Amino acid sequence: SSSMFLNQHRAWSAAPALEYDIFPYSESTRRQIRVLYSIGLSGYQYTDTTIYNRIRESIPFHNVTVAVGLQQAWGSVNVNGNANWFLADPGKHSAGVFGSVNLRVVKGLALNLGGSVNSIRDQVYLPKLPGTDEQILLQERQRATTYRYFVNFGVSYTFGSIYNNIVNPRFGGGQTFFF
């Protein structure tokens, strides 16, 4: 993949994971409390030299995610917590919480509210030369930060087959994380 915002020309990641849901799989479309642990390696080829004088690097990491999801007739609630650490430098880490509520108004129509907050201490990809104000506003570059937050709200309408929302919930299938 490629991203100017993340100063990445190429990026890859491989991480085996273990996941445990306290509820049986037969109930996973209605409720779940999952804990996921992964350990792996990410590789990066940067577009510009980073603040650590790197143009490419491989970073071993591990990650813990806890996800709670409830699906009821009135709507759904999802809360996810996530923490990442670099194995070679535990001081470089990030953690965050994401939550969302979808309230059904009538069949197919729902009100949506969500948000996240993140603590960031692992921006090793930042380019050595800072971006201009224009690049920052256009989200072509980012500045160093220790936190990030996001809030969203909206309205959605779902129609079609009753089976179009069925997704395997394991390993976060069908859920969005903003970390």
Image: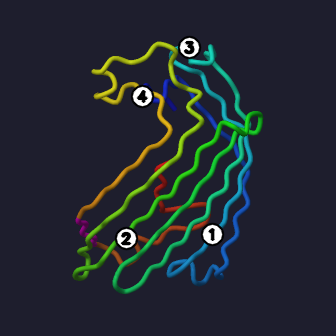
How packed mark 3 is, by other alpha carbons closer than 10 Å (few <14, some 14-19, many 20 or more), is some
The earlier-in-sequence mark between 3 and 4 is 3
Instruction: Please report the bounds of the magenta region as a residue range.
Output: 155-159
Distance, label 2 to label 4, CA atoms, is 29 Å
The residue under label 4 is: 142
Q: Which residue is mark 1?
A: 34
Cα–Cα gap, marks 4 and 1: 32 Å
Foreground residue, 3 or 116? 116
Tell me how far mark 2 sits from mark 1, CA to CA. Answer: 18 Å
Q: Identify the residue under disc 3.
A: 49
Q: Are marks 3 and 2 in contact (CB under 8 Å)?
A: no
Picture quadrant of residue 40: top right
Amino acid type shown at disc 3: Thr
Type of amino acid at the residue the image marks with label 1:
Arg
C-alpha distance separating marks 1 and 3: 38 Å
Residue 160 horizontal/vertical position (percent): 29, 72
Label 2 neighbourhood size at 10 Å, few (<14), some (14-19), many (20+)? Answer: some
Q: Nearer the viewer, residue 110 or 64?
A: 64
Q: Amino acid at mark 2?
A: Val
Residues tagged 2 and 4 counted as in contact (Cβ below 8 A): no
